[in-house]
């Protein structure tokens, strides 16, 4: 009756675990950069579109023209900041001192502007993932009128 593993069986198990780790670790590292870039791009675009829809409701249905961006959209989380001194409010994402993306409300001109600059991410892999999400562009600037 055999009660232990042989040396060859242990070596096979170690080799299999090593192969799995060699494949999984690079995939995981790229997944982190892709998730960060995807999160910032999607959050920026969604916040801008939501701001337009809500601004139309406030202005047309409630006859309210004195609101700020943080009254209609609320972005929280690591890197997100709010600037109340810019037009009618501006959210921006800061990555190590560089503004990667922003959403700005301008009631006087009935517009919401958003911008994303992939070159402002601090690491090159996240920059590449961001550019891929933007159709291989370094940056986008979009004005949405309402």
Image: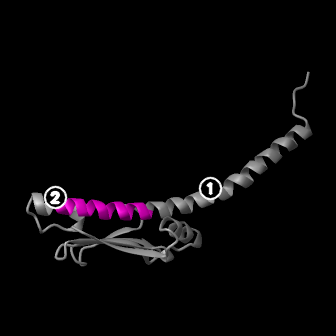
Residue at image location 16% in from the left, 76% down from the top: 108
Quadrant in the picture for residue 86: bottom left
Q: Indicate the position of residue 26 as horizontal and vertical percent values.
A: 67, 59
Dot 1 corresponds to which residue? 28
Q: Does 61 appear in magenta?
A: no
Residue at image location 56% in from the left, 72% down from the top: 123
How would you rate the neighbour count of disc 2 (Cα within 10 Å): few for under 14, some for 14-19, many for 20 or more?
A: few
Q: Given this view, does label 2 or label 1 mark the residue nearer the observer?
A: 2
Q: Does 45 appear in magenta?
A: yes
Query: Does residue 75 appear left or right of residue 88 in this picture?
Result: right
Query: Does residue 22 appear left or right of residue 137 in this picture?
Result: right
Quadrant in the picture for residue 49: bottom left
Dot 2 corresponds to which residue? 57
Magenta stretch?
40-56
Spatial separation of the CA atoms under disc 2 and disc 1:
42 Å
SS assignment at label 1: helix
Magenta stretch: helix, strand or loop mostly? helix
Query: Which quadrant is the N terminus positioned in?
Result: top right
How would you rate the neighbour count of disc 1 (Cα within 10 Å): few for under 14, some for 14-19, many for 20 or more?
A: few
């Amino acid at each position: 009756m055999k009660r232990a593993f042989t040396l060859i069986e242990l070596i096979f198990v170690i080799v299999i675990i090593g192969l799995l780790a060699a494949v999984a670790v690079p995939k995981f590292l790229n997944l982190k950069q892709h998730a960060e870039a995807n999160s910032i791009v999607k959050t920026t675009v969604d916040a801008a579109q939501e701001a337009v829809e809500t601004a139309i409701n406030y202005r047309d249905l409630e006859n309210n023209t004195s609101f700020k961006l943080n009254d209609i959209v609320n972005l929280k989380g690591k890197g997100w900041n709010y600037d109340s001194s810019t037009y009618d409010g501006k959210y921006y994402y800061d990555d190590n001192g560089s503004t990667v993306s922003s959403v700005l409300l301008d009631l006087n001109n009935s517009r919401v502007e958003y911008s994303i600059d992939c070159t402002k991410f601090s690491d090159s892999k996240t920059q590449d993932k961001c550019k891929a999400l933007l159709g291989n562009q370094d940056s986008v600037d979009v004005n949405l009128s309402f």
